[in-house]
Image (cartoon, rainbow, N blue to C red):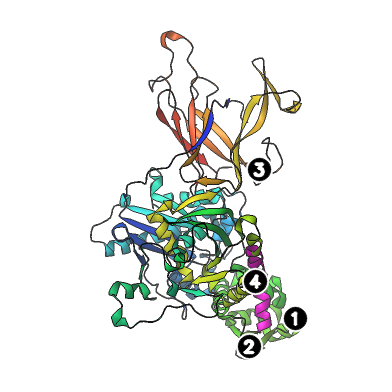
Amino acid sequence: INNSFNLDILSFYQRVEIRPKAACLFSVVVAIDFGTTSSGYAFSFTQDSEAIHMMKRWEGGDPGVANQKSPTCLLLTPHLRFHSFGFAARDFYHDLDPEEARHWLYFDKFKMKIHSTSDLTMETELEAVNGRRVRAIEVFVHALRFFREHALKEVKDQSSSVLEGEEIRWVITVPAVWRQPAKQFMREAAYLAGLVSPDCPEHLLIALEPEAASIYCRKLRLHQVIDLSVQGYSSSPAAGPGSIPAREQLRRSRHSRTFLVESGTGELWSELQTGDRYVVADCGGGTVDLTVHQIEQPQGTLKELYKASGGPYGAVGVDLAFEAMLCQIFGEDFIQSFKAKRPAAWVDLTIAFEARKRTASPGRTNALNISLPFSFIDFYKRHRGQSVEAALRRSNMNIVKWSSQGMLRLTQEAMNELFQPTIINIVQHIEELMSKPEVRGVRFVFLVGGFAESPMLQKAVQKSLGRTCRIIIPHDVGLTILKGAVLFGLDPTVVRVRRCPVTYGVGVLNRFVNGRHPRDKLLIKEGREWCTDIFDRFVSVDQSVALGEVVKRSYTPARTGQRKIIINIYCSTTDDVVYISDPGVRKCGTITLDLPEAGAEGGTGAAGGGSPERREIRATMQFGDTEIKVTAVDVTSSRSVRASIDFLSN
């Protein structure tokens, strides 16, 4: 504990405060689904909240793919200025002369880095394809600014009343398994990108991806899903167009850019009783993210039953397996050299694989062809003095053949080998979750996210779980999170109870008790014996925390005239913590309380020159939202004290 601050705990109580629903100050909600492989935005006007408007289709999309989202790739000029994002970035980079391309900075799948960095800060760097490094925050700011400009233009096109910034509520999605620093990182990026001002933090919500998907799944109708547990589609009987009202036709249209959701809950939900539980498995590009919800009828609010779990087992794993296979055939040194010298051609090759990957299915008998860029074949010949075909023969890889048209032919066996490690990880993860006591007896598993479109994954999940519960896949599975994020922005109180991912607390001094406290924790201060480093728990791992439920603590400054109280926050993945020095406990953040001058604030200066009385600052922390929030008040003067919580500066 920082000895200059005497954190005497004066009082502690915890109680539930149900917050009144905030008056709707927003005329529009704009959600950005910032994915590992693809991203997009959608919006809804609060006057017509059943209609969700999807973003315009992108120029230069891939053939055969519904380009409702854009690839998450960013291109910066050699002078580090923003050039383009999405398909435009990919196409421009691809068309650059190879010599020139080496100086441009191309980033893709960069969201993965935020999950994998254990000590994320504002200084964390990302590496472009050409090896140059840039601060990660700058890359995210460029991407968010791009979405801000596009979304604002489109919102203004649809709404005659010109919107001011205050009328927009922004929502940004992140994986539920992300820790606090990563969520704060996204918030800081949004401030820097000009989405909202740091003075109005409530204009930005961080939504958790599987939670957003779950909110959307509440609205589903039977004809909008594929049910894997009963063979084939569960579609509603078709009616002639004449017999369906216009609004209903729009609801059923799969290609309209305006999507209508139910005003209440959807038909699937009528089969659920109060207390029924379901799992949402969000299988994205970078992560697999699992959430367990229980529905509370009749209001249809949701309650999280088990802390979010998952990990970096997204579709990118299949791409990495393909890269590893290429290294095995052609040599790792060659592949690394090719990536560095011909970065745009390397990106081409990964795109070619990506497109073929989508068509891989378990029942397929013929091989999948992936065309190698000419520069790959040429570079290999010059680099190694032999042909690609010879390399394949020498590698003894019977599952990959060479076709005279300049293509790698991947047999079904090869595709299985590339998919299996990632799919096994995902299925194991879902099975492990289903075996937890809180999750037993789950009736539905919703499979969402871009990777859920893969027949390889669908088949594996069906085989593993199809007998015990219903596996439901929404039709527009890649857009489920985006639509749910808009619904979350319209009403963030839908998820009423969440579970704590870790145990949080602070270090405090307590009276030293001989025989109970270890001698090395003894601190003698003004003749009194204190025990240092005692862990004062705010919330415990997997504890249920309701919206509006708060934890309160009171602190006193150690010295009169002190202008700041800084409190270190500690966390642990277990709950058996006694001291902040226990194994597994780490400092994860700080709370800063800015103290106004006591006299100036008409508060606690003593009259007549006597000794000033001790000030009490009461801090209130909220753990039930998607982010941890703190407020504080000076008890004597009842004035609020500037309080901030920081997880990024460690």
- Asked if the residue under mark 3 is in contact with the one under mark 4, i.e. CB atoms within 8 Å, the reply is no
* Location of residue 32 with respect to 607 vertically, above or below: below
* Location of residue 528 with respect to 97 vertically, above or below: above
Q: Disc 3 to disc 1, how far (Cα)?
A: 51 Å
Q: Which residue sits at x=38%, y=42%? A: 199
Q: In this view, does 29 lie to the left or right of 391?
A: left
Q: Disc 4 to disc 3, how far (Cα)?
A: 33 Å
* Mark sitting earlier along the chain (2/1): 2
* Mark sitting earlier along the chain (2/3): 2
Badge 3 marks a residue whose secondary structure is loop
* Amino acid at dot 3: Asp
Q: In this view, does 368 lie to the left or right of 27?
A: right
Residue that carries the numbered disc 2 in the rendered image: 365
Q: In this view, does 298 lie to the left or right of 344?
A: left
Query: For the residues carrying marks 2 and 3, which lies nearer the camera in this image?
Result: 3
Residue 296, given in percent of the width and then of the height, sits at 47, 55
Query: For the residues carrying marks 3 and 1, which lies nearer the camera in this image?
Result: 3
Residue that carries the numbered disc 4 in the rendered image: 464
Magenta residues? 412-430
Residue 108, given in percent of the width and then of the height, sits at 53, 65
* Amino acid at dot 1: Ser
Circle on res. 395: 1
Residue that carries the numbered disc 3 in the rendered image: 575
- Asked if the residue under mark 1 is in contact with the one under mark 2, i.e. CB atoms within 8 Å, the reply is no
